[in-house]
Image (tube, grey):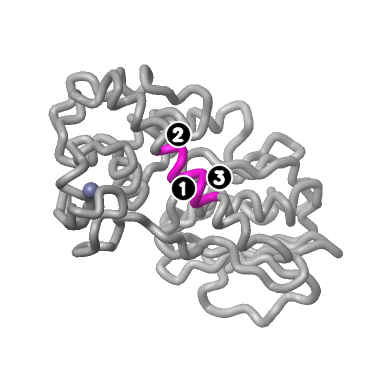
Amino acid sequence: MPELPEVETVCRGLARALEGRRLSRVQQRRPDLRLPFPPRFAERLTGRQIVAIRRRAKYMLWDLDDGTVLLGHLGMSGRMQVGVGPLPELGPHDHVVFETGDGPHVIYNDHRRFGLMTLDHRDTVAGHALLAGIGPEPLGNEFNADVLSAALAGRRTPIKAALLDQKVVAGLGNIYVSEALFRAGISPEREAATVAGKRAERLVPAIRDVLNEAIAAGGSTLRDYVQADGELGYFQHAFKVYDREGDACPTCAKGIVTRIVQSNRSTYFCPRCQK
Ligand SMILES: [Zn+2]
């Protein structure tokens, strides 16, 4: 499943390929993904210029010149294939095709179809049911230790579960929560309400650092994507604790990375240096 850094990388890659371009042809090749496509989906996009492509939580927002916003999510297995020249032969999992005349084309492929694409308007999209209630962007200026502490106040759940709640902070997934708690030296089992003061002041930059490093790693895979067919959406990134059960802790060297299950999801941490 793509996490926030991958979605950010996809958005940046799509922006480089599509911003300023006009959609000359859009093919919608099935009636639905996780949700039905809206009425006249392809027709409403055709002929429109793409002004900007941006991310909110793990959603992509394409701003079009008439105020329409294409709101999309990659689901579990969605991929954006950017290419130049003639369209390749399309497969059964190629669900949407965006063409820009002489410019690049983008094929949305999603074999599990948990992704979605819908349309809204720039004046109302922030209140769309999929986006309303989502907390602050972890990389945005509105996210800081005070905001985080306030969101965690009174929460008796483990901090791991609280950070996965999209109302607390937007777009954090299982992998990056494990990594950020490791860097901040905070046990994933600690009661969320107790992550305040110095702990919150350590956790916010830890969250930003793990995300920014992954985005930088993903960005390096974007180079030259227009020259050759480039698939956006997934990249390998080295994690310090995630999926490293049994390894020596890279911080204290004496602890052993341990896996526990919280809310049916694996958590990896060092019991020696995360308190
Ligand atoms: Zn350790």
Q: Quadrant of residue 219?
A: bottom right
- Helix, strand or loop at mark 2: loop
Instruction: Quickly name the residue at label 2.
Output: 138
**Where is residue 120 shown, x and y percent of the image?**
58, 38
Type of residue at label 2?
Pro
Do labels 2 and 3 touch, CB within 8 Å?
Answer: no
Instruction: Quickly name the residue at label 3.
Output: 71
Q: Quadrant of residue 180?
A: top left
Q: Residue at x 60, y 68 (%)?
A: 231
Image position of 195 with respect to 51: above or below = above
- Helix, strand or loop at mark 1: helix
Instruction: Quickly name the residue at label 1.
Output: 4
**259 inside magenta stretch:** no
Type of residue at label 3?
Leu
Q: Which residue lies furthest to the right in this view?
A: 102
Q: Nearer the viewer, mark 3 or mark 1?
A: 1
**Which is nearer the N-term, disc 3 or disc 1?**
1
Q: Which residue is drawn at 61% across and 63% down?
A: 221
| Circle 2 residues within 10 Å: few <14, some 14–19, many ≥20 | many
**Which is nearer the N-term, disc 1 or disc 2?**
1
Type of residue at label 1?
Leu
Q: Can residue 68 be seen in this view?
A: yes
- Please name the predominant secondary structure of the magenta segment in the image: helix
**Where is residue 88 shown, x and y percent of the image?**
69, 79
**Which is nearer the N-term, disc 2 or disc 3?**
3
Q: Which residue is drawn at 66% across and 44% down?
A: 53
Image position of 172 with respect to 128: above or below = below
- Which residues make up the magenta segment? 207-215
**Where is residue 31 shown, x and y percent of the image?**
51, 62
| Label 1 to label 2: alpha-carbon separation | 10 Å
- Helix, strand or loop at mark 3: strand
